[in-house]
Amino acid sequence: MFKILLVSNFEGGFQPMTVASAITPLKEAGFDVSVLDTYVDGILEEKFAEPDMVAISIPLFDALFAGIEIANRVRAINPKAHITFFGQYATINAYRLAGKYGNSCVTGEWEVPLVALARHLSGDEQLMLPGLVTGEMVEKGEQIHPYMAREKFHLPTRDMLPPLYKYPQVQVDKLVGSKQIVGTTEIARGCHHKCLYCSVFAAYDGKVFLVDEDLVVEDVRNLVNGGMTHLTFIDADFFNAKHHGLKVLRRLHEEFPNLTYDFTTRVDHILENKETLTEMAGLNVSFITSALEFPTQEVLDAVAKHTSLEDIEEAVAFLLSTGIKLNPTFIMFNPWIQLEDMVAFREFVEKNGLDEIIDPIQYETRLHLYKGSPLLNTPSVQALELTDNEFHVDWKHPDPRVDELYFASLTPQEEGVFKRCCLKC
Ligand code: SF4
């Protein structure tokens, strides 16, 4: 039987949803599927020898270089295997990954293209290969649209992945107030918004696909059976599908009254949905992650956040009144701050009572410019000293003291420590 190995290396320190969602359709199509999450199990090279196809998940920038390293090891051990990449960050780097680091790369939603590729490689030459960039296409300069024709989602396969307790989440424990077994699911993929720095926007261009309510509930049942005590919705923005999300939460709370939740949403959505959030507090939503970027209007405007400092402070105060904690994220080091703004930042944190809550890693985040980022077309970024790299663009702050402060603030890089501002980039 045609053998497929699905590999994950990092998905924010959570059980990898990207791989869980790919297992099911491949198994339903009759393939022999095995899985490796190197985040938990390390690079088990013995798993590379036999597969006919190895699909490496690249959901985030932080998974990119380890994914390439895995591809190199597979190639050395099993030169005949077809190596492909998939996931949100693979989508925005498909033409840089296909050919050079693997045979192909999926661009867009991955389940249908992965099944089509496996069918094609196992002998069905007649099939179209939607959403698949090959090395040959890169050589010829051929471009395709990402595959965005979603018809349905499949129930993620959880029991082939490492158990949930292998994915500890210190920040969740801190915010919930006790040790948790954390699982993740999603009620939708994509995002309606178009924040200029964001890789979700780059991959989905404002599109959102809803996951069927029954499917979400069934997935959560499986996660609870796997020991989950706290659920993180990894949606780019939970309020992309507000009514859908509220219905899901009501059903889950009825079935699992002790389960707690967190999700991510924007400041403007917090302010627009006060009544809904008050109900959600009663449904055990314990905290909300929100990208505050940097508390100056200049930064908020530069990334087209469409919010104000006053809005942020109102949202912080409102959440406090509901009992839902705020887990703020920042783009701490960015080209639009001045050194003096660091003092204003400290005052903002103290004034809003955020000091105890902020994940320390947030003090080390730096604006990431992916290749093709719309920010690269803005005058304020074009005025910077930029260095072109294969997968991203480095920038220097006009005031060298800001960059000195950034490098001085960095703690030694520990494996698996996530230094991005949200779970999706
Ligand atoms: S930053 Fe958040 S709200 Fe903005 S496009 Fe990205 S996921 Fe959507």
Image: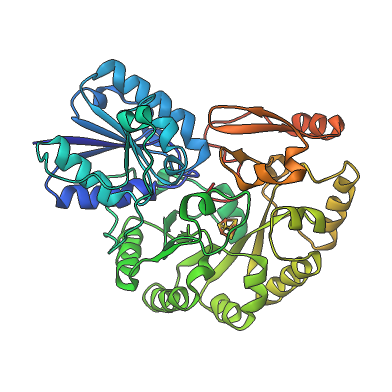
Identify the image quadrant of residue 41.
top left
Identify the image quadrant of residue 208.
bottom left
On screen, residue 364 versus residue 341, left or right, reads left
Residue 289: give x, y in percent of width and height: 61, 59
Identified at 57% across, 81% down, the residue is 276
For the residue pair 148 and 420, the one nearer the viewer reads as 148
**Coloring applied to the structure:** rainbow
- Tell me if I can see residue 416 in this picture: yes
Residue 48: give x, y in percent of width and height: 26, 25
On screen, residue 127 versus residue 82, left or right, reads left
Seen in the picture, residue 188 relative to 22 is either above or below; the reply is below
* Ligand 1 occupies quarter: bottom right
Seen in the picture, residue 424 relative to 290 is either above or below; the reply is above
- Tell me if I can see residue 32 in this picture: no
Identified at 78% across, 37% down, the residue is 383
Residue 421: give x, y in percent of width and height: 62, 48
On screen, residue 318 versus residue 82, left or right, reads right
Figure quadrant of the N terminus: top left
Residue 334: give x, y in percent of width and height: 75, 43
On screen, residue 275 versus residue 95, left or right, reads right
Seen in the picture, residue 207 relative to 391 is either above or below; the reply is below
